[in-house]
Image (tube, helix red, strand yellow):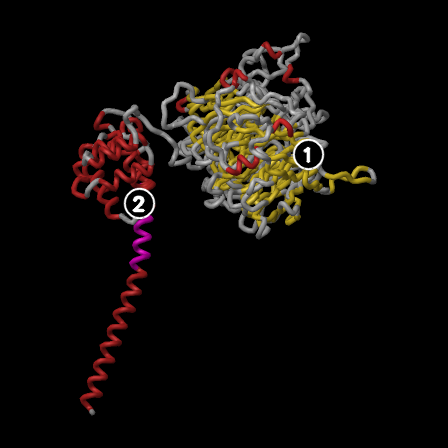
Amino acid sequence: MKANYKFSNICGTVYRQGNVLFTADGNSLLSPVGNRVSVFDLVNNKSLTFAFENRKNIARIALSPDGNILISVDEDGRALFVNYKRGVVLHHITFKKSVKDICFSPDGKFIAVTHGSHIQVWKTPNHLAREFAPFVLHRTYTGHMDDVLSIQWAEDSQCFITTSRDMTARLFTLNPVEGYRPKTFAGHRDAVLGAYFSKDGNEIYTVSRDGAFFTWRGKVEDLDSDSSEHDEDDDHPVASTSKFNGSASSSSSSVSRKIIHTRWGVHKRNYFNVPGSNISTSSRPAKVITVTYHSSSSLLIVGFSTGIFGLWELPAFTNLHTLSISQESISSLAVSPSGEWLAFGASHLGQLLVWEWQSESYILKQQGHFLDLNTLAYSPDGQTVATGGDDGKLKIWSMQSSFCFVTFSEHSAPITGVAFARYGTNVVFSASLDGTVRAYDLVRYRNFRTFTSPSPVQFTCLAVDPSGEVVAAGSTDTYEIFLWSVQTGKLLDILTGHEAPVSTLEFCPEGTNQLASGSWDRSVRVWSVFGRSRAHEAFTLNADVLVLAWRPDGKELAVSTLDGQITFFDVAESKQTNVINGRNDIAGGRLADSRTSAANSAAGKSFDSLAYTADGRCVLAGGNSKYVVLYDVREGEGVLLRKFTISENLSLDGTQEFLDSRRVNEAGVNIDSLIIDNDDDDDYERRRLDDTLPGVQRGDMSVRKYRRSARTKCVRFSPTGRSWAAASTEGLLIYSLDTPNTANFDPFDLSLDLTPSSVLSTLRSKSYLQALVMAFRLNETPLLQTVFEGVPRGDIKLVVRQLPVIYLGPLLRFIGGVFLKKTPHVEFGLLWVNAVLMIHGRVLRTGGGAIGGDQSLNMGGDMPSVLRVVKAALGECEETLSRLCDQNMSSLSYVVDQSKFIRQQEQRRQKDVEME
């Protein structure tokens, strides 16, 4: 059993807060998901989440114009400098203040960052030069009296305009210009959210929060005139002398010179006047939340607090489009480089939308659970996952695309249980606190059956027998278990005997007609539900039962209790076989309002969910902490194999083992637990810690804001055993043994001299084996394919014979996973496969035993899975060739028939000539 599962993806959450943005080609969309970044491929309909994590929730992200560098900044101003194509963190930097906006200059040489009321411009690190300091501060700009909200560069990167909460916008030059002072654009009555240059540079547009839109025009001044005559009221310094590193720009473009040497004035005032919420008998306009501008098409896109967005064509200020896309305010929006697609993010509901405004159709429409996930279930084939949350919605996710393709919202209360039938993938069941159990058809996407009890009760758990004909649910009110027939929808039986709420249910997977139930009365009962006697056997434990799980062979039962123990029972012999005390393993971080340390705290030291692996050798367990643990339970053992940390996000409560004493005030109260009401802050969850009654898991419902804690409510293994999922505070986390992205940067045995150019130089010198090994060490797919195809046919056997055994796995994985799927040179790939099997067949058969080592270590991977990949690729090639041959046979038979027809016509013509 392998334990090296790695983070693969996040489902269930598509947007949290911050800004969304398009890539340079417009085919992908980047969205902050908590303290991670997700990428949505809009063309191939797939999504992935980078493995790197910020310290806290991401506030802003920025992508360089060439698409190589991604910068993500968290709420505290700590930034990660990431190679976007590889997903590798290159550098960390702290801006020391919260960042409202960050953007690259159009030429990619500079990065502008808001720093309170100042603006800092940093030089972009150069990957071609070896520098001692990756980040170098170019200059600091001052002049605003309040926090700067946005930055917009001119097209030639020589100047930029900023907006602030002080209700002004200011125009700065990148480098000092003699006699120039920053221009001030005043006149708004609320915070200015955005300022933009027109394409020709003759106009500047500013938008404020109250819905005012100003158009600024000017007259080009005499370049020799003293600009101070026009800026007598602007006495603010241009830059702090200690931060000044730039020099005067010797050559500026004509557009920048025109923008700089212009006396600007208000040309026209317009107002959006989008209706807002009704208050008494009056209606006030909605506030502007976010705004962006597409200069090529002169389109202004504005998002409002009522969930409405509008498109205006400038400079005429003509309204082209107005649409309501959300019930809550629009938190962020972006426009694709072509101007055809608009992306919207709504943090309150967790929505992410991509709208094509010309055809008025959705390109992408995704919404996660805007409340916590409660439960999940894998389909029998492992291709889909069903999730249920506190919002009462049941969502079905595709594991291939990581998208939600159907949402059922029939429940009116939180969903507590989700299950698939073992021998069917087209039906999913859900139980809810609204007193119903529902069955959904995944072919027609409808709720075809609803099960209810004779008297209204709340259902806390759900189980479906392997055949899918009987569904059972446990109640929290009457302590009973209800069984229904799926075909008829009728109530079959009511099982009584528990003396407290039923917390967990599960049918035996081997079809022995046994149903196991656990309750808070400290007992587990195994029922013979289809027998005439309705006999059951009870197991007594020392604490309340939280969850149980059957081993896949149906011979063992694992039970988790409130005291942090996992107890194992042999059902056939009715005896206890093993006990694991996991209190110290599952103990998480310390809560901000906790008076005791994490080690001494009793909170969260129990497992809320258990899952066996497919082979029954290990048990995966999660609970009210940031850890998910994996135990080896073979032969009565209870060995901890690995602890997985689901999140390092400090915005969540319980992620730190030790709290910072500097954040405790004189009264002994942690300042993170105090109420901080800020109407301008759109994040409504992270400003309050709840002080609730014992046992309350969802926060105090009487407070406006609360801080969520890191916890796992449900864990499940995929039927294939290659991955597992966890329903956590961050969303649906997927951990997998397989690499989530084949293009991920995963080199080994590197050196300073190992570069793509040196690999190609080695290939040109006809050192094929050395070039192939160097390409494997860099592990870049395009480079590897170039070297692979550069080996002559006659040298294939020689190269394979001398190839180290450690590269056999990567070679076969490349041939089966990449080469045979993308190239027409099928025979060339088959020659390589044949050479590997003929020369290294004995090593492959013995699993590395011929060299006295472990298979996964000495041959670069799990060889059975690698060989299955090659087999699948060869099967696809065979299917493609057979289909092509069948088509060619039909074409050839047609050609032969035509030749016969022509020959017969010639013979008839000759006979006619002879007759004449």
Residue 336 in sight: yes
Residue furthest top in the image: 666
Percent x, y of residue 200: 55, 42
Quarter residue 850 falls in: top left
- What residue is rendered at 69% in x and 27% in y? 679
Quarter residue 495 falls in: top right
> In front: 6, or 694?
6
Q: Disc 1 marks which amino acid?
A: Arg
> Mark 2 or 1 closer to N-term?
1
- Which numbered marker is on residue 209? 1
Q: Quadrant of the N terminus?
A: top left
> In front: 3, or 106?
106
Percent x, y of residue 327: 67, 40
In the figure, 168 relative to 821: above or below? above
Residue furthest right in the image: 281
Q: Is residue 444 magenta?
A: no
Task: Please give the range of residues in magenta.
Answer: 870-885
Q: Is residue 872 magenta?
A: yes
Residue 366 in sight: no
Q: Disc 2 marks which amino acid?
A: Leu
Percent x, y of residue 910: 20, 84
Of marks 2 and 1, the one in the foreground: 1
- Which numbered marker is on residue 188? none
In the figure, 500 relative to 590: above or below? below
- Which numbered marker is on residue 820? 2
Q: Is residue 824 left or right of residue 374?
A: left
